[in-house]
Amino acid sequence: MGRPQAPLLYGRDPLVGSLVPSLTGLAYEERARRKREFGDDPPVVLLTGQHGLGRSAVLDGLARAYDTRLPLAHIRVAVAGAPDPETPPGGVPAAPAADLVQILERLVCAFAPGLGHFPVLLPGLFAVSGWYLDDADGRDAVCVRHARLLDACGLLSGPEREVARQWSERVEASVEEAAGAAAAGIELQDDDGSQPVTAAILRELQSLRSLDPARNWYGQRHTAPAGATARPDALLELGRRFHRGGDYQHAVENTLMAAFLHEVSTAYGRVRRWNREPWPLILLDDAHTPAGRRFLELLLEHRATAQHPGRDRITVVATRLGDLPPDEAPHAVRRELADLLPVVGGAHRKDAAPLWQRDGHDPSAGLLVVPLTPLGRDDILSLLDRASSRLLHPHLATALHALTGGHPSASTVLCDAVVHAAGQNRAVTPKDLLDLPTAAGRPVTHVLLEDLLPDRRQRDRLVVLCLARDGAAAEALAEDLRLDGPEQLPANAAAQYLVERQWQQTVPVEAPLVENRLLQTLLVHEARRTSPPADDPHSWYQIHRFLHLHHVQRADTEEADALRHSLATGNAAQVVDMLADEFGAEEAEQSVEHWLVCLRHCATAPTPPVGSAPSGAFYGSDGEGWSDQRVEIALGEHASRYTHLDEAGRCVNRLLHALWYLSEPYADPAIDPDAETLCQAVGDELGFLSRRHPAWYAALGRAARDWPAAARKRQVLPVPASEGS
């Protein structure tokens, strides 16, 4: 069997098909050479973006495409508590690393079979990694790491655990031997007594290979302490300085990075360079973590040094969660994906400025920052091409793009669910998207939220708290529901989690708790899907009733929020009554702007769960709960239910239900005939009301002209000012 083909990376062709091949000298999708650009000073490519924008997917695709074709290291900087990501079928698993030393260890393991056994760096890595004599867990963890290095460099072979056990026994036996020699008054030349484990590790490594090249190399980089009568062992000194921490540790990390670059550059001698052998490719996921930032920082510092010996052509593609602040990399070159195609002579067009070139000696000048952007509608259409077209709504790609904003993870999961549904001979319309199951039978919203919000406690909180308008309402709701957790302010902790996950910049105070539209849509739908029975305190209805009362008690100016929560329970009757009473009052207490704002805002209410409302909660309730009849009510098909209302009240009722339907993400007039009909109806109803109000006629008349046009463009409905305001 041949090796699996690299997966399609929709919307990422400029990156994987042009930029990376120009750095590696190898084409992405075919086994062919490409011209290498950027001379002997290539940039470090940093891909930025939010969760789900495909940062890891790009690295997975590159790992699959270049595996076995060049020296490849695929590393994920581990985050404490984060689950290990799944490797796509046929992919190259990313090796986890928690600190800079472990990153370098992973690089040695990946590159040693093809580039040599790292005679300088390997002893340095052993010198800075040891354990305390009474720390069995630390010993076992370090020995597993050593076993990988020993196997990669051909010094010891066998199953990893067995090699680790043998190595542990050898080192501890050496420690005991040294202790016995010291008790007998015999001085060992390579042990100064302060680092018995490190000295034993180096003695055992010395029995497998000579450490003289490493001692000479590190000795040349560090001068002996003032007043020293004898030059200390360079490797023991390296370990001692590393474990002192602070500036000493940073200096040692800098030395280890220099050793890595030195040995890779040395491996690419004349023969390799003449043969144009491809240089190594490093794929570093989650480089926003402290260890990832430290690795890039040291690499860029060395490349920016004028005395940097032997320019390396290592290709580094790293990912970062969120944007890169300008003050963190002031001299970085920033390019959009569209700028990368094609890279010719280092420029994207013959008449354009170079795509990247170093500007000065600041380390950040070695960065080429490329934000990953959302998918386009054509990309989503390509994802849907796998399904039977006769079972799909013709504008499903447009609806899906409007729902997800082109978010790659959400788009992929939803498209896969659509393809699965089509395979089950189920027709799919825009309204069905969030109710689809995955191929494994799980709800798509649950699958997506698990990926986008991995912390289960905070995810469960947000599913409930997302229904609140702002932080204050969310905290009141959290207190009422007695949400579990060690934090004093659960809603604030949930909002802070969103900041940490880069979903928003700050913890909102007066703004919605969840600012990202896609995430809010998914959370609200999940709250509706998982709502317990109507009488349960945690049910959809009880939550919205609590929030309705909260806004009634908080301030008269929050009438719009109170009405919105009433409508979210399906209680359109209460909303219509209040709007109609205010419209028909002989002496209006509120302005037309206030009335229109209330109408516009409450009509954005999420719909209640179908069939779960308590009997009598709204007009037309028949004991079976709420059902979506908004279009029919807006078009006057159930007029017999509302005979108790006067003519203006019935008009308000139709108008409210029309706007309520048009607030849905799938109600796009360009693809939904019902939505287009309701846009026209909104204008007609507002025009009718304008002719029946002695003071509001001008503002309502302008709204009758402006609101249908704004609804067709999916824009915010403008609120005109009344005369004299």
Image (cartoon, helix red, strand yellow):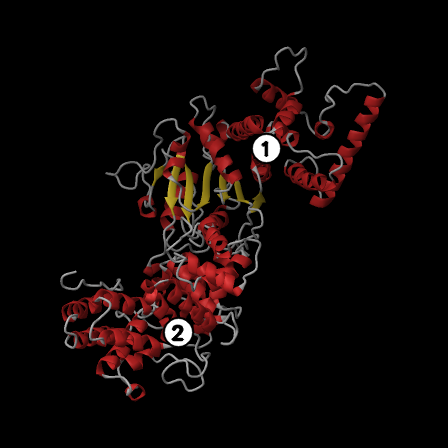
Closer to the camera in the image, 502 or 605: 605
Provide the secondary structure element on which disc 1 rests.
loop
Disc 1 marks a residue whose amino acid type is: Gly
Q: Position of residue 386 (x, y in %)?
A: 41, 67
Is residue 700 visible in the rendered image? The answer is yes
63 w.r.t. 681: above or below: above
Disc 2 marks a residue whose amino acid type is: Val
Is residue 448 visible in the rendered image? The answer is no
Which residue does the image show at 22% across and 66% down from the upper left?
591
Q: Position of residue 719 (x, y in %)?
A: 22, 63
Provide the secondary structure element on which disc 2 rests.
loop
Q: Position of residue 682 (x, y in %)?
A: 22, 74
Check the picture and name the quadrant holding the C terminus: bottom left
Q: Position of residue 574 (x, y in %)?
A: 34, 77
In the image, taking residue 144 as reference, residue 303 lies left or right, namely left
Marks 2 and 1: which is nearer the front? 2
Distance between mark 2 and mark 1 Cα atoms: 56 Å
Other residues around mark 2 within 10 Å, as few (<14) / some (14–19) / many (≥20):
many
Who comes first in sequence, dot 2 or dot 1? 1
**Residue tagged 1:** 116
| Occupied quadrant, residue 359 | top left
**Residue tagged 2:** 428
Which residue does the image show at 32% across and 73% down from the upper left?
661
Residue 294 is tagged as none
Other residues around mark 1 within 10 Å, as few (<14) / some (14–19) / many (≥20):
some
Closer to the camera in the image, 286 or 3: 286
In the image, taking residue 42 as reference, residue 95 lies left or right, namely right
Which residue does the image show at 55% across and 47% down from the upper left?
94
Extreme-right residue of the structure: 184
Closer to the camera in the image, 352 or 368: 368
